[in-house]
Image: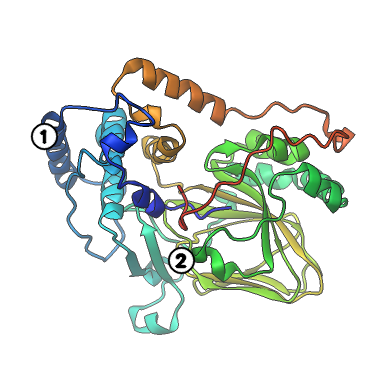
Amino acid sequence: MRLITLFSVAQCAVISVDSFSVLSPSVAFDTNRDATRSRHLKTRIFRREMVTSNPSSVELPETSPLDPNSFAGLVEKGIIDRFGDDASRIVESWRLVDRGYEHREFVGRQQEPPVSEEDADKSNCHQHCHSYVPGLPAKTFYDVNDFEWTKKLASRYSEIREEFLSVTADMDKLTEEGNNIWAGALSDDASSYGEGWRTLVLLDRGTWDPVNVNLFPKAATAVKECGVPAVEVFFASMKPHTDIKLHSDFTNFVLTSHLALEIPENGSNKCRLSVGDDTREWLNGEVMLFDTSIMHDAINESDGTRYILMLRLWHPSLTEPERNALQFIYDCLEVPELLSTLPEERLMGDVKLAALRAFPEIKRKASRGFSSSGNKKNKRKKKGSGGKGFA
């Protein structure tokens, strides 16, 4: 599992056009024409009203068009060409990342009931983002009844839990046949999760893991059929008598959701999650939705391991073009041909991308359990992380 931020993409964005051409030899364009287009777009960005009025009280630094000969500049051009003014907030966010901007803000006034500025130093309602899209509300917990997909997902709890417990009952076989089973944090930024927190990934940055999907087809199919706007999906475990330290996930354009699968001593308030100043306990079969750009922590005081299905999904205040523009940034690192100036190369990139985004074929019925072959030829190799997603 990787934290979804734009920050490490910017770290990759020092690649020049010449270096990048090793992957896509025809990436080239008229820099004078493109710089002019970017300047015009910048003027429109600062003159037009945002789609959602920015609730932030923090004044953002002024941004400017990126170097057209850099990877970041190529991505910016791709966003502008594909989405135009509809993605102006994403262009601004991308430029803020390039500046190394970190957004820090007290968001207590956005909560219900509000937390006053006078209590800011005693509150955990602080937002910290390396990747910040302006204008998105920052609420600790959302009312899950406001979203149709949360109700649908909760209704699939029994089948997801039954499959999960059945497959994980034989850990030796799961480890042999699965892909990166119960992996720990991939980066120093995720170190606050501690040694007791482990993940088993089904979906990573919009790409399904075909090996693990075939081990947990009911869970993966439920997420897909319920219409969850997910970017990442994974099971997460938390060992008994461990905690997750107060931290931020550094990104405000995704929310986090949990479906509680197996909560030890369920209902005893021993397994808790706190976001800002609000605390909830995990309860079997219930869905929670919250903003992990706000400082949060968790604890398992029980004698058993806590298991959840964890989902990271697009912030509901993003427009569809904005979601697509953010996904495009992920896609450019996976399929650099998307940035080519040659139509045939872009078409090849679109074909590759469609294959990556396709839901995997379920090669066996869920009731048959593990395959006996132990064949790992199709396992996806775990990607290294630069620390903050998109690596």
Amino acid carrying label 1: it is Thr
Amino acid carrying label 2: it is Ile
Q: Report x, y in % for residue 54.
A: 29, 55
- Quadrant of the image occupied by residue 225: top right
- Quadrant of the image occupied by residue 376: top right
Camera-near label (1 vs 2) is 1
Q: Distance between the Cα atoms at labels 1 and 2?
A: 38 Å
Above or below for 42 versus 189: above
User: Is residue 86 among what the camera can see?
Assistant: no
Number of numbered callouts drawn: 2
Q: Residue at x 42, y 51 (%)?
A: 253
Q: Is 305 situated left or right of 353 in this image? A: right
User: Is residue 343 among what the camera can see?
Assistant: yes
Label 2 neighbour load within 10 Å: few <14, some 14-19, many 20+ = many
Contact, CB < 8 Å: mark 1 with mark 2? no
Q: Residue at x 33, y 35 (%)?
A: 20
Secondary structure under badge 2?
loop
Q: Closest to the observer: 305 or 127?
A: 305
Q: Report x, y in % for residue 222.
A: 70, 38
The residue that mark 1 highlights is 36
Q: Report x, y in % for residue 221.
A: 70, 35
Mark number, residue 294: 2
Q: Closest to the observer: 122 or 382?
A: 382
Q: Closest to the observer: 225 or 367?
A: 367
Q: Is 271 situated left or right of 158 in this image? A: left
Above or below for 360 versus 69: above
Q: Report x, y in % for residue 139.
A: 46, 62
Secondary structure under badge 1?
helix
